[in-house]
Structures are given as C-alpha cells and as structure tokens.
Image (tube, helix red, strand yellow):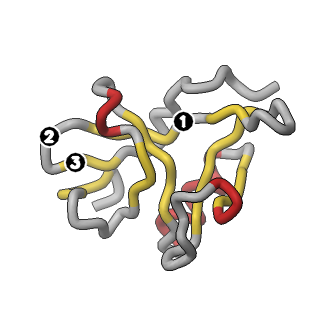
Amino acid sequence: MPKATNEIDPSFWFEHTSGQRLYPYRLRNRDTGQATFRVARPGTGANRKEHQVELADVDEVFRHVFGLGWSVRLRGHDPKFNGLYNATGYSIVRTSES
C-alpha cells in the first residue's frame, strides 16, 4: 500500500541554493486516486501533469532521475520550494549522490 500523499521519502535529496534540502514525495492523482511520485523527461513541457510519468517505487524514481537525467517533484519544509527539479538544475547545488 503506497504511503500517504505529500509524505516525503528520504531515499535521496537535492540541496537548493537556499540551503534547504528537497525530497521526493507522493502526489495523489485526482483522476485515479493513486498516490505516486512524478518524474518528467527533460524538454517536454514537464510542469504539466500530462507530461509527467507516475511511479510507485522510489527506486524506479532514483533510476529515472540519476540514470536517465529526468526531473522529479520534490518538496522541503518550506512549501515555496515545492516543485519539479533536475539534479543538474541551476538552483541545485548538490544532491545526495554528488
């Protein structure tokens, strides 16, 4: 059974230029009711839901983000940083894998 919506998964993190650590989290799809992680291929207008891929397994998210260079929805303790980020994005200074 998937964890609750908006619950972060500490498996990996990105550090924002503000110093805040951002973590992957599950979002509930209003159409299906499923709570999944969302990733997006670069250059696809990724901030739109229809261009994002929903994944249930954080290990699969990790593979897409660090193996394929996809972006992932992340959040921190401050909600203004919630959003779609890429490991090599301009606002990311390091990741748990760097």
Under tag 2, what secondary structure? loop
Figure quadrant of the C terminus: bottom left
| Frontmost residue, 40 versus 44 | 44
Report the amino acid beneath label 2: Gly
Judging by the rendered image, the residue that carries numbered circle 1 is 25
Report the amino acid beneath label 3: His
Residue 32, quarter of picture: top right
Q: Tell me the tag on residue 10.
A: none
Residue 52, quarter of picture: bottom right
Instruction: Give neighbour class at mark 2: few <14, some 14-19, many 20+ (Cα, 10 Å).
Output: few
Distance from the alpha carbon under mark 3 to that under mark 1 = 16 Å
Residue 80 sits above or below residue 4 on the image? below
Decide: marks 2, 3 in contact (CB < 8 A)?
A: yes
Figure quadrant of the N terminus: top right
Judging by the rendered image, the residue that carries numbered circle 2 is 19
Judging by the rendered image, the residue that carries numbered circle 3 is 16
Q: Identify the residue shown where x is 35% and y is 58%.
A: 97
